[in-house]
Every structure is written in C-alpha cells, then in structure tokens.
C-alpha cells in the first residue's frame, strides 16, 4: 500500500501546475482512490449550470463508486452521462453513481460522463479555481481544487 501511495504522489507531483490540485490528502483513503486530473468550464454571467471533469483512479483491490458531489460554488451537484437517442444527445443523471473499478479508473469528460454544478452562486471565470468534493461508497471524501478553463474546453488547457 505504501508503494501505491508513493506512486500516486509521484503521479500527482508530475502534473502540470494548472492540473487539478488535491486539497484534501487523497492518499489517506485506504483503498487508494485518487483524483488524477480535472478541470471545470467557465460560464457566462448568469448561467445557472456548469460542467466539471475529472479522472478518478482506483488503485485499491475492491470496486468503489462515486456516489455524490458537492461544491460551495453550487446549490447542488449531480453526476451525469450524455447518451444519444436517435439524432439527439441527452443528459441523464446517474442516480446510482459511477463505478470506479478496482485497479482501474473512470474518466469524466465533455460529451460523456461529467459532473454538473447546478444553481451556481456566481459565474465560473476562466483562470479561477472551483472547489469540488467527491464522495465515494468506500473511500473517504476527496476535495479537489479544479482550474476553470475556457467555456468550450474539451480538455484542460485546450
């Protein structure tokens, strides 16, 4: 387990300074769940919602599940997926959460699974950061400080 924690720390320390900054000690989670990277999209003034995207790695030996998200910047948050129905893309909440397989990861990205910040308390401004807490079925909650990227970013820095 110490080697896993060390590998996680090395992976986090090798990220660019603009990548997700872990506010809480992710290595404290006994099952090895960590946030590898992430970002949120900027919004226009008055926009009620925003999207946030993270990669969650599970270095543990049991599956885990992302079951909740929250942010002081939003009245509420949900975990969503985008699906095609005919020619229409629809956004649906994942009411059962999101599986993070043991030894694997889950990627939340634009036009796919993502985090929705709803009832925003103010605009998300490019260059700022937004705090998000992810809650898991087994792992301790992890708080990340996500960089806010452009309104149409498809990945951090793009």
Image (cartoon, rainbow, N blue to C red):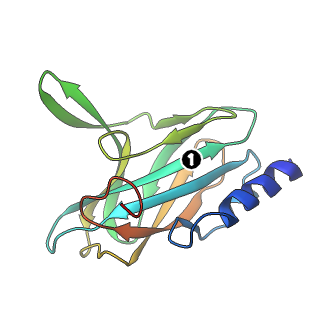
Viewer-nearest residue: 48 or 147: 147
* Residue under numbered circle 1: 56
Identified at 49% across, 43% down, the residue is 67
Q: Position of residue 109 (x, y in %)?
A: 39, 46
Q: Secondary structure at mark 1?
A: strand
- Residue furthest to the front in view is 158
User: Tag count in the figure?
Assistant: 1
Identified at 37% across, 78% down, the residue is 127
- Residue furthest to the right in view is 2
Q: Position of residue 35 (x, y in %)?
A: 58, 54
Q: Quadrant of residue 122?
A: bottom left
In the picture, the quarter occupied by the C terminus is bottom left
Residue 3 appears left or right of 87: right
Q: Quadrant of residue 21?
A: bottom right
Viewer-nearest residue: 112 or 115: 112
Q: Quadrant of residue 26?
A: bottom right
Identified at 68% across, 33% down, the residue is 102
Identified at 59% across, 54% down, the residue is 36
């Amino acid at each position: 387990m110490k080697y896993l924690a060390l590998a996680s720390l090395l992976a986090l320390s090798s990220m660019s300074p603009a990548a997700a900054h872990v506010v809480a000690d992710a290595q404290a989670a006994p099952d090895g769940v960590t946030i590898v990277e992430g970002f949120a999209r900027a919004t226009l003034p008055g926009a009620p919602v925003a999207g946030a995207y993270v990669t969650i790695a599970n270095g543990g030996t049991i599956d885990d599940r992302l079951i909740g998200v929250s942010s002081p910047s939003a009245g509420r948050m949900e975990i969503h997926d985008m699906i095609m129905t005919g020619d229409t893309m629809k956004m649906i909440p994942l009411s059962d959460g999101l599986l993070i397989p043991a030894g694997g990861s889950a990627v939340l990205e634009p036009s796919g699974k993502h985090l929705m910040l709803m009832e925003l308390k103010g605009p998300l401004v490019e260059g700022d950061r937004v705090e998000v807490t992810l809650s898991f079925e087994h792992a301790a909650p992890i708080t990340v400080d996500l960089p806010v990227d452009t309104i149409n970013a498809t990945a951090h820095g793009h």
